[in-house]
Structure formats: C-alpha cells, structure tokens
Image (cartoon, grey):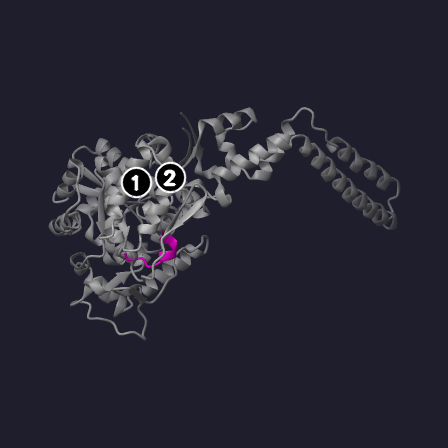
Amino acid sequence: MSSDKIPYTKISLFSKLVQDYLSQNERLATFYNRHNNIENFMPQIFEKEKQDIDRSLLVEVLNEQYKGIELSEDTKDNISSLHNKKSFSVTTGHQLNLFSGPLYCIYKILSVINLSEKLKEKYPTYHFVPMFWMASEDHDFEEINHIYLFGKKIEWKTSQSGAVGRMNLLEIGDVLENLLKLIGEGEKTDKIFSIIEKAYSKENSLARASRIFLNALFKDDGLVIIDGDDVRLKKQITPLIRKDVNEKKFYSLLKDQSTKLGEHYKVQAKVREINFFTIRENERQRIDTSIEVPNIDKHPEKFSPNVLMRALYQESILPNIAYIGGGAEIAYWMQIKSVFDSEKIPFPILVLRNSALIISEKHNEKLKSLGFSSSDLFSSEQELHSQYIARQKDVKSIDNELEHFDSIFEKIKSKYSAPVYQQIIEAEQQRQRKTLNILQKKLDKIEKQKHKSALDQISKIKQYYFPNNGLQERHENLIAFYLKYGDNFIKKMKEELNPLDSYFVVLAL
C-alpha cells in the first residue's frame, strides 16, 4: 500500500469558495464563526455549553429510533453520554442513497469519526460523539434510487413519492436480486449481502434500512445516527417555524447574506421567503400563499425544513460543535450565518470532508512505468498524452524551426519599414504560421500513432478512475471496494484520512 497527498489548492475540481475557506481568505471571514483549527474547538465548546439543549429528550428519541437494532457498546455509550453537558457531537449528514450511494458518503462518516477521536485526544475532559444526520425528508427520489457498480446502474423503481425516508421497501426485491447476480459468490460477497439483505428487508422504511446498513458498518466506531423526521424533535423548533412561515423573518437576512456571498462566489441554495415545506404521507410540498398551512403549535411534524432551515434545526437540538460536509454544503451553511446570529444559536465550525482516490497497485505500477505518479491523474487526458509524448527521446518536433521562422520575418520587416510593406509581410507571416501549425499537428499525430499503445493505456486508466470526467468518490459505491478488500477497506481509509488536513488522498491498495 502507498499513499500520496495532494493539496486541495492544486486540484481544479474544488470551488474558489472552498479554496478560499481553506486558505482563510479574509473575504470569507464574516460568513463563518471559527476556522477548523483544532485550537478553535475549545472556545467553540465554551460557546455551545451556554446553549439550552434538551439532552434528555435527544437521548430518549435516539434510543427509540434504534429500537430493535443491535448496537455496539460504543454506540450505546455515545448515546448515553449525550446526557452529560461535557459531551458534544460532531455531525455530518447525507441523503438516503441506496446502499449509501456514492463513496463520499463513507468518507463523510469516517471524517466525523476521526475528528471525534482527535478532539478526545486534544481535550480529554470532554466527550465527542460522531453523528450522522439522515436527510430522510428530502424528496429528490431520482437522486437516491440507484448506484453504479462495475459499470452498471442498479436502480430501484417505485411509484411512491414524498419524503424518501418514509418510503416502504415492498418493491425492493428485484434490486436485491439484480445486485446478487452482479456481485457473485464468495466470503466477502456473503458478508456484505447479508448486511444489505437484513437492512433492506420489506418490513423496513428506507430511513430504517439506511440506519441498519450504516450501523452495521460503523457500530464499532460508535457512530450515532439520527433522523430529524420526529415530532418530539420538531416541537423544539416551533418558534423558528413560526418566524419563518408566519413572519418571514429570515428572508431579508438570508437574502442579504447570500447577495454578499454571491459577489465573489456561487450561491448554492436558492433564497425563498418561506423555507419550510408541508409534509404528509407521499407528499412534500413547498409552502406558498396558495396552500393551506397546518397549525404550527399543534402539528410541528407536518413541517419540513429546506436545506437552509435544516442547518438551523440541527444546531437547535444537538450539542453540536462542528459540521463536516462537502464544498456545496460549506457554501450553503455560509448563506445562513446571519440567521444563526439573529437567533443567538452558536454557528458550528465548518470542516471540509475528506476526499480520496483509490487505485490498484497494478495500475499504480503501470503509471510509474509510463512516467507518471498517481497524483498526475488529476491532469486532463490530453495533458497526460502531451506530457508522455514530450518525454519520449525519439519524438521529433519542429519547435526550433518555428522559432527561427519568426526571426526571418522580423529581418524582412526591418528592410521594408514603410507601413504598406509591413502589412503585406505580416499577413504573409500569419498565413505561413498557420500552415506550419497545421503541419505540426499532422506530424504530432504521426508521432502519437507510434506511441498509441501507451497513450491508450493512459486513457484507459484515466477514464477508469475519473468516470465521466468526475471524481471516483462521486460515482462508485462502497460495495465494489468491500468485495475486493473486505472490512479492511474501511479500516485502511480511516487510518489514511485526517479531517483537519487540506489534502486529497490518493491511496494505492
């Protein structure tokens, strides 16, 4: 096994906002509370300690949500610890993608686990709980109903609608059957499929299935999973719902903050006058003046926050000191900082989740033989081809001749200084330069043909690890790596990822 760490600043796939946040650019200083330096967590703890959190209710809800699920002692202890005012959560969240969806969901969870452990080492008098917030109320079914595995798409089809977490799994049988056919047989296959089969049984909702699946993978790390779609938890934010739905109090704050952020960066979430939906069975509907709104105090469970209000909801009910997310999440959290300030709710430390690229030792060795390191894979396919060709000793070029070409015309122009001559000479220079460029391309094409086999190998490796020119972690699913490396995969990734590092990890296994 070998690893390579690439600074995020050298990877063009990350937004300007992310780059500026990591470099602590002053332009972003008013859009967050404290930067993610480990020393900043102590003042964050002091601030969060002053907030009134109903810890007993939180523990009660978590225990009920886990009812009937086998828990590790670490998870039990972490849930119980939330009673204690010296216990704080470190949270991430994600949609309820089928079988955890793209690989970066796993990296998010490992990030909260690792950060919790680092904080415990740094501040031993406090306890830190890694927490996963299930986005069970989202209704974008097409985003969560499939995975890609071995180049094939496995898709769950259902006529259900509304909040995905409430959906039943009565129609999931074909998905499990197709998955089993694809992954074949073997010890690792049997283990991962038994976890999936138990989680995604027909009597479960998608929310419960997701909880069981992730709990099986991370229970030994003490991960605590919470579902915000709970009437008891929502009762705690009825004042916030009223302010948003009835008074539209947050609109101007969100609009002003987003406008300021938008002066230099892409605004991630659309700002609306009302930021809650109504939620019923098979329906989640945005609130506007045309629909009847339930009584908030009597039925808080019938209100569902949008992505911005979800952040406020989460920090209102959890003893949370940090939120770990991707670049888009960091961006939309920054849109709501002013609302946190107005409600006097501590704004959590924002931490960019870890990112990684997993390559095989075989491909890593092939890259080396072609003159590349694994980090070079972040270059475009064309750039890789050009770099390879440029290094070949037998490659011919007319670059020197092109340099002399320009000097010849400069000498001619020095002999004919009148404007009428200059125009004619420059036009001819441009015409012949264009002809020589065409010649250069033709000669380059012939040179590349001589190295076609090597260039094809470069293209194949690049396309394999960057499907559709995107990151591996945004396409591939955990199952493929589990089948190859077993439980060892998650353990190795946990060892390699540091949530307070500003590096993209390339790992050859």
Q: Is residue 336 visible?
A: yes
Q: Residues within 10 Å of mark 2 (few under 14, many from 20)?
A: some
Amino acid type of the residue that numbered disc 1 sits on in the rendered structure = Phe
Label 2 residue SS: helix
Q: Residue at x 87, y 51 (%)?
A: 420
Amino acid type of the residue that numbered disc 2 sits on in the rendered structure = Ile
In the displayed structure, would residue 171 be above or below residue 508?
Answer: below
Q: Toward the viewer: 188 or 351? A: 188
Number of the label disc, if any, that sits on residue 193: 1
Mark 2 and mark 1: Cα distance apart in space: 9 Å
Q: Quick one: label 2 or label 1, which is nearer the N terminus?
A: 2
Q: Label 2, on which residue?
A: 183
CB contact under 8 Å: marks 2 and 1: yes
Q: Residue at x 33, y 41 (%)?
A: 106
- Of the 4 image quadrants, the one containing the N terminus is top left
Dividing the picture into quadrants, the one containing residue 257 is bottom left
In the displayed structure, would residue 70 be above or below residue 361?
Answer: below
Please state the extent of the stretch shown in magenta in the rendering. Answer: 137-144
Left or right of residue 261, residue 49 in this image: left
Q: Is residue 38 visible?
A: no
- 495 falls in the magenta region: no
> Could you tell me residue 277's position as x and y percent?
29, 65
